[in-house]
Amino acid sequence: MFMKMRNFGIGFVLFALLFSSCGDYNKILKSTDYEFKYKKAIEYYEEGEFVRSGNLLQELIGIYRGTSRADKIYYYYAKSMIGQKDYLMAGHYFNTLINEFPTSDYVEEAQFMVGYCHYLLSPKPRLDQDVTQKAIDAFQLYINLYPYSDRVEEANRLIAELQDKLVEKSFLSAKLYYDFGSYKAAVVALQNSLIEYPDTKFREDLMYMLLKSKYLLAVNSVEDKKEQRLSAALDEYFTFADEFPESKYIKEAERFYETLAKELNYNAETSNLN
């Protein structure tokens, strides 16, 4: 019985504190004492109350526009949006701070945070990667503008992570044509991926799929294009075997070679008879 009464008492006190807190916050929202509002907005931010901080700062942006405090309000409002996981809005306000207050003490951090907001918005590799490229561009701009900053190492690390995502997206896009059996389109996509990312960790897989795509395109080709495609596939085999002689795909690649060589010899003999 005593424990129940004790728990009830604690619960009542917590409820009373919460109710009192909400009441105080509502009073602050309605207040026209903007200096007090500003101080409370910063306090709320530092306490992790990002929604309350953001609501107050959003109003203060208009109130303090054109004053020496305007850049700081933009800065904390953008940071409060980060706290609320609204990375799109945060990036917008960091970018606005950079454009409207180019001499502000917050500009360097804001430039980094523009890239970081894009980084946080970057989707999985299978999806469109426009935001990923924007993040890379923003981080690269930061490095160019502040080459001696303590954040350069982190910016480079995040760029490398984002570039890996672009590489994987390129690989998956090319592989999609291959998986669907669209070998003509696959050849173009696979070659483009290898040209754009020659050092990709997927290089062996891409080159094998390119070889197999050229092989299947050749052996199933119409007669007037067959010999040219067989030769192209054979060249691809030599390229693959030379670069990856111990590949897990090498046995299948050698079977392709045997078929291609046989087909080309047959065509050569037929040509001599004519």
Image (tube, rainbow, N blue to C red):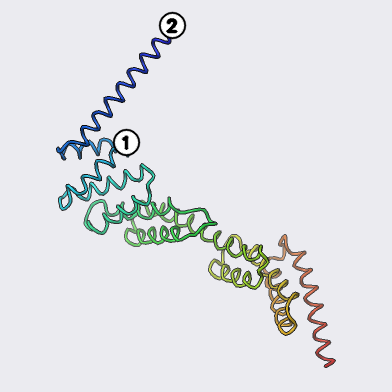
Task: Point out the image quarter for the N terminus.
Answer: top left
Task: Point out the image quarter for the C terminus.
Answer: bottom right
Residue 219 as seen in the image, left or right of residue 191: right
Identify which residue is drawn at 79% across, 68% down: 255
Identify which residue is drawn at 41% across, 6% down: 2
Q: Sequence order check: which comes first, mark 2 or mark 1?
A: 2
Q: How far across and how far down the image is residue 100, in percent?
A: 23, 57
Does residue 187 lie above or below 31 as drawn?
below
Q: How far across and how far down the image is residue 176, in percent?
A: 62, 62
Q: Which residue is mark 2?
A: 1
Q: How far across and how far down the image is residue 108, in percent?
A: 29, 54
Tag 2–tag 1 contact (CB < 8 Å): no
Q: Amino acid under label 1?
A: Glu
Residue 92 as seen in the image, left or right of residue 33: right
Q: Residue furthest right?
A: 273
Q: Residue furthest top?
A: 1
Does residue 73 lie above or below 195 as drawn?
above
Q: Residues within 10 Å of mark 2 (few under 14, many from 20)?
A: few
Q: CA distance from mark 2 to mark 1?
A: 37 Å
Q: Which residue is mark 1?
A: 49
